[in-house]
Amino acid sequence: WPRQPPQPCAVRLTQYQVRYRSSGGDWHQLPAVELPREEETSVVGCQVSDLDYGFMYEFGLRLGNAVNRWSEWSPPTAPLRLELPPPEPGQTLEHGGLRVAVVSTTTAKLMWRPFSIPCRSDRTEVPILVEEDLSGAERKAAVDAEYE
């Protein structure tokens, strides 16, 4: 994702938060984390621990700015069964994908490219995941938020 918005923005994105759930269960929110500076990394990632082997999990992401305003949560990712060997990711990081992979029997790792939501737009939708389901239909997840 492009790190900088296409037009100057008064309030920059400074943090992100990930949530996860066992398919059909309640969401568990991880603590908010500061986004690394643009010069520090081109890919942002986090590791989710204490997951149960064999269970299906979904993940979501939201972004916060410097005045602590948050985007809406992204739609959940496609369910991921926590089992080894790890599944193949559906979308490359270079094309804006949110990659979810199994690291161990209790841990999943998420990675994505940083991006900014343009200011001065009534409604902005930034895709974070594009994939095809088993029927070949395209499914998109996005950060969908209102900013002033």
Image (cartoon, helix red, strand yellow):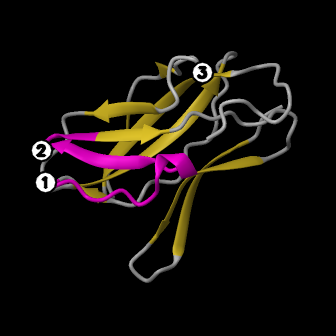
Q: Label 3 neighbourhood size at 10 Å, few (<14), some (14-19), many (20+)?
A: few
Where is residue 21 shown, x and y percent of the image? Answer: 33, 47
- Residue named by callout 1: 84
Q: Amino acid at mark 2?
A: Thr
Q: Is residue 26 visible?
A: no
| Residue closest to the eye, 125 or 112 | 112
Callout 3 touching callout 1 (CB < 8 Å): no
**Where 46 sits versus 141, above or below?**
above
State left or right for residue 13 relative to residue 85.
right
- Residue named by callout 3: 38
Q: Label 2 neighbourhood size at 10 Å, few (<14), some (14-19), many (20+)?
A: some
State left or right for residue 49 relative to residue 105.
right
Task: Indicate which disc, 3 or 2, sits on the residue closer to the N terminus.
Answer: 3
| Residue closest to the eye, 75 or 39 | 39
Callout 2 touching callout 1 (CB < 8 Å): yes
Magenta stretch: includes residue 95: yes
The picture quadrant where one finds residue 15 is top right
Q: Disc 2 and disc 1: Cα gap in Å?
A: 7 Å
Give the residue at the far bottom of this rendering: 135
Q: Amino acid at mark 3?
A: Glu
Magenta stretch? 83-108
- Residue named by callout 2: 105
State left or right for residue 138 relative to residue 80.
right
